[in-house]
Amino acid sequence: MQSSTQILGTFNTITLAEMEGVELMNRKDVKYFFEAHKLPAILSALQEHYKVLHINNCRVFHYNNIYFDTPDFFCYYQHHNQRINRYKIRIRQYVESNLNFLEVKFKTNTKRTVKTRMKLPAFTDTFTEDAKAFLRKQTPFNPDVLQPVLRNDFERFTIVSNDLKERATIDNELVLMAKNESIRFNKLCIAELKHDTSSSGSRFKIVMRDNFCPEMRISKYSVGAAYLYENLKQNNWKPKKLRINRIEHEH
């Protein structure tokens, strides 16, 4: 079978403007993580039904992220303890376009995710005064208390269904970094499907099911922190860490 990159090269393409012009009303998010060796079969089954995002002759893009939390890891624990109305704060770099944003993700009590962001001049682990003002407006945190606790880098491509009712991102080559330590995941893929709940018969969900990739929530920040800060409470992440370890250590 062809490699994932070769198969991705056979997909029809969609531009960023065309993709962003599509509003997914009543959107639902579904996450998966699975073995990278399954990706060629998955992509082959999706190729006729999806287009791949294409920007400046690129189909695969690199992302760098720095996550911020309080000294007592308040954001981490809110997620671990399954609290509602919780926040995630990061600075993200879109490497190929050299764009940098401070992003705040807020999970509401209706399980809706609201993302706000502001553009930054550089990829950095410190806040400008404008960034601090943004954080005071968008979060309940004092920005002077927030500190960088985790960096992760990964590769991503995005596919959009031909009927424009679904889009999915697939990430791989994930690297976690904190405290002068790093962990690289060479065999792990993480997918997120965004689809309109008014539609049915998702081709993506069918293909994932056919390839034995079950739906499973995962946060690259929270699980990453659990790997690199072993003193943190992580009972709720242990089954996911065990599954990731099995994926990484399979022959």
Image (cartoon, rainbow, N blue to C red):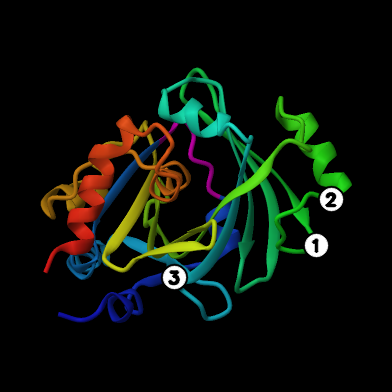
From mark 1 to mark 3, how far is it between C-alphas? 30 Å
Identity of the residue drawn at 33% across and 78% down? 5
Q: Quadrant of the C terminus?
A: bottom left
Using residue 226 as the reference point, say whether residue 249 is left or right of it.
Answer: left
* Residue 170 image offset from top left, x and y in percent: 37, 59
Q: Amino acid at mark 2?
A: Thr
Would you place residue 174 above or below residue 81 in this image? Answer: below
Q: Say whether residue 191 is left or right of residue 181.
A: left
Q: Which segment is the magenta one? A: 22-28
Amino acid type of the residue tagged 3 in the rendering: Thr
Q: Secondary structure at mark 2?
A: loop
Lower sequence index among marks 3 and 2? 3
State the mark number for residue 121: 1
Q: Quadrant of residue 30?
A: top left
Sequence order check, earlier mark of 1 and 3: 3
Which residue is rendered at x = 56% and y = 73% of the image? 55
Quadrant for residue 40, please give it: bottom left
Residue 90's x, y, as percent? Answer: 62, 47
Q: CA distance from mark 3 to mark 2?
A: 37 Å
Looking at the rendered structure, the secondary structure element under dot 3 is: strand
